[in-house]
Amino acid sequence: MALEVDIEKRAGAFHLRAAFRCDSEVLGILGASGSGKSMTLKCVAGIERPDRGHIALDGRVLFDSDRKIDLPPQARRVGYLFQSYALFPGMTVRQNLLCALHAEKDRKKRAARVDAMLALLQLRDAAELRPGALSGGQAQRTALGRILLNAPDLMMLDEPFSALDAHLRLRLQMEMKDLLAGFGRGVLLVTHDRDEAYRMCDRLGVMCDGRMLTVKGTKALFADPETRAAAALTGCKNIADARPTGPREVFVPAWNARLITEKPVREGLQAVGIRAHSFNPDEPVNRLPVRILNEMEEPFAWVSAFRFEGQSPDAPALWWRYPRECRPKNAPGALGVAPGEVLLLY
């Protein structure tokens, strides 16, 4: 399975430029609200029409501006799970699932396939309930089941967990991860949640202001986000402009800090990032004097705000996060960061 997308679309002042490929995998699109994530899905689904470009699924052209091809949504064989789930409110769970099998004329086969889906998604006890009586998780699973019964060539999930509380969200992410692994085809998952993206996706594309900045393996992206936007979206709290001062050395004016890097510094360096958990009072490299400003306790960690000695007065404080059991008796006078933890951003 391969989805190939290379499109542009303008909507007022907004300009979407998305180019990527999705194979038989879960490809996440990570971005802030308004970055163009949902518009990209709608263009693939045929709900929105790009101004130019090309979309193909398994070699079948869904859209091509030059060749005047624009298949209607129902002909694209794409399953789209909306944020609202879009269930029919007057129908039971069973009836909502049956709607996906309208082309199957054998009543017994329809009933058997729906019963199997109810069992798979643990919805047997809710089969005769209407959407208004369902929990958030039951509604989500019903919408997902309706898509799976349609046997689409591609599945697209638009912020599928955003309406759920934290406990239910984690449980359903585990369940859906197993379901998607068995789907055997491509999945596009739109999210603004970095933890969700890390748990669910094989690869991640980062979208910012309508542009797909980079697409790479999820773990590789978190280890080396490459751009300022990607670093921020993956949770990096400490980012500042930087300039190269050697093959593996940079200077950060706002922090008045010279840092050694593990990776060679390439042309085009704009900034560096250091994740809050990367600082270490026992690290001898890139060790600089600091002044702890304040602390905040979290359920399983402490977060300290600090400033480097000589740091620019108008530069924001930096953040250091460490496990509760590692809290020092006395505030450290210096913190270091291993060269491999200095993120080079271009």
Image (cartoon, rainbow, N blue to C red):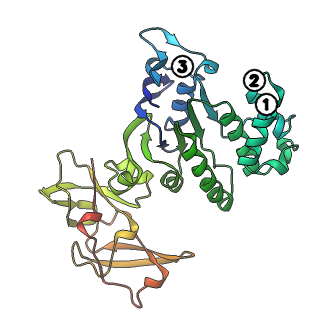
Residue placed most toward the observer, 229 or 103: 103
Q: Indicate the secondary structure of the residue bearing disc 1.
A: helix
Residue placed most toward the observer, 152 or 259: 152
Q: Earlier in the sequence, mark 2 or mark 1?
A: 2
The residue that appears at 40% across and 36% down in the rendered structure is: 212
Residue position marked by numbered label 1 in the rendering: 110
Q: Indicate the secondary structure of the residue bearing disc 2.
A: loop
- Observer-side mark, 3 or 2, equals 2
Q: Indicate the secondary structure of the residue bearing disc 3.
A: loop
The residue that appears at 52% across and 51% down in the rendered structure is: 200
Is residue 109 depicted above or below 200 in this figure? above
**Kind of residue at disc 2:** Glu
**Kind of residue at disc 3:** Arg
Q: Are marks 3 and 2 in contact (CB under 8 Å)?
A: no
Q: Which mark is residue 49?
A: 3
Let me know if residue 221 appears in the view: yes
Is residue 263 left or right of 290 when viewed as pictured?
Answer: left
**Kind of residue at disc 1:** Arg
Q: Residues within 10 Å of mark 1 (few under 14, many from 20)?
A: some
Residue position marked by numbered label 2 in the rendering: 104
